[in-house]
Amino acid sequence: MPKRVDHEERRREIATAVLRLVTTRGVEAASLRAVASEAGVSMGAVQHYFTTKDEMLHFALAYGNTLLAERATRLMAEQKPTTPRETFRLLCTLLLPLDEDSRAGARLWAGLISRGCVDEPTRKLAALAYANLTGFVVRQFSDALPDADAAQPARHLVSVIEGLRWPVLFGVYSEQQAMDVLDAQLDLIF
Amino acid sequence: MPKRVDHEERRREIATAVLRLVTTRGVEAASLRAVASEAGVSMGAVQHYFTTKDEMLHFALAYGNTLLAERATRLMAEQKPTTPRETFRLLCTLLLPLDEDSRAGARLWAGLISRGCVDEPTRKLAALAYANLTGFVVRQFSDALPDADAAQPARHLVSVIEGLRWPVLFGVYSEQQAMDVLDAQLDLIF
């Protein structure tokens, strides 16, 4: 009797293997074959769930975002921020590569930016991710600061967070230096 | 009689081929073989000048920075900024992907960030580039604003510029929106 396979669970296992490969060996290394080997499944199994490498990468990114949202929810419950500024500080900190999870996320993101420069489906995906992140910040700002024009400060905050990632990841800016920049940015808004 | 080869000229030709390949097909595509083909020289000729792919990429990045410095000097001579703020605005604009040259530079940079996540020599190179850029901004700030603490605002400005690159390159933020963010950042400093 064939074993009942939980399809969503299997897709997540494969996505986890993609994330591991991308963050240790780079986005170019995440071929269907390498992912099958990393996940301990057959090429056919990977191809059953993902027709192309792009489809697989896109699912892995979405899965990475789900994990990020879960971490955000957990952190908010633990630290219970009481002002919009504290909430924003917490959420922005999650995007900075200050622990192993967020460093892995930054490495995945670096791979997608790089691939987005030469591959149109990935450019669209990266563009959508930037638009979504900016839109999320705009909505939060609109709630916290109803009278302000939210779009321009949202783009400013997103840029600062994005731009801090690489000098922090590469060890050029310390965690404290990054938080000082973030605080200066939040001072500008709140 | 063998033709006299200008070695520096030949290295620059190869670096130009690297930049072309990286910006059209990505950093992974810039193998010694592909570069030789793109430059119209033999593999042996490329290997005569560069022992490894890393060495070749590092020279291409340095050459890209030289081209950028030349563009900066030219633009300063044309536009003759009269205040530190105008000068900074001009220099920051050069780093944003608003024309074909700076888009090519951003694509090269994306490739190096991505490779720097999984390759130690490239990480060191990228770290050095961020440290140099930040140091350059600190020195300019120290001249323009002698009484201010220059390091933190320099890191803030570098982050904003770096973070604006990708949403601009991917068509999420318009040129005007990017310049509005840059102006808000300069308002904070000057």
Image (spheres, coloured by chain):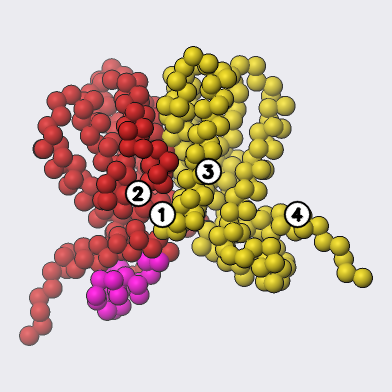
Chain colours: A red, B yellow
Q: Quadrant of the N terminus of chain B?
A: bottom right
Residue pushed farthest right?
Answer: B1
Residues at marks 4 and 3, common chain? yes
Q: Residue at x 62, y 53 (%)?
A: B59
- Residue for badge 1: B117
Cα gap from disc 2 to disc 1, whole angstroms: 9 Å
Tag 1 secondary structure: loop
- The picture places residue A142, in percent across and down from the top left corner, at 26, 25
- Vertical order, B9 against A152 (above or below): below
Kind of residue at badge 4? Glu
Q: Earlier in the sequence, mark 4 or mark 3?
A: 4
Q: Nearer the viewer, mark 2 or mark 3?
A: 3
Which tag, 1 or 3, sits closer to the chain's start? 1
Of all chains, the one bearing label 2 is A
Could you tell me how far apart the alpha carbons at marks 2 and 4 are, in whole angstroms?
Answer: 37 Å
Q: Position of residue A92 (x, y in %)?
A: 28, 36
Q: Specify the segment rendered in magenta.
A: A29-50
> Which label was assigned to residue B8?
4
Is residue A34 visible in the rendered image? The answer is yes
Q: Say which of marks 2 and 4 sits in front.
A: 4
Badge 3 sits on which subunit? Answer: B
Q: Which mark is residue A106?
A: 2
Q: Marks 1 and 3, Cα distance to the nearest angstrom? A: 15 Å
What's the chain of the residue with tag 1? B
Q: Which mark is residue B106?
A: none
Dot 3: few (<14), some (14–19), or many (≥20) neighbours within 10 Å? some
Which residue corresponds to mark 3?
Answer: B129
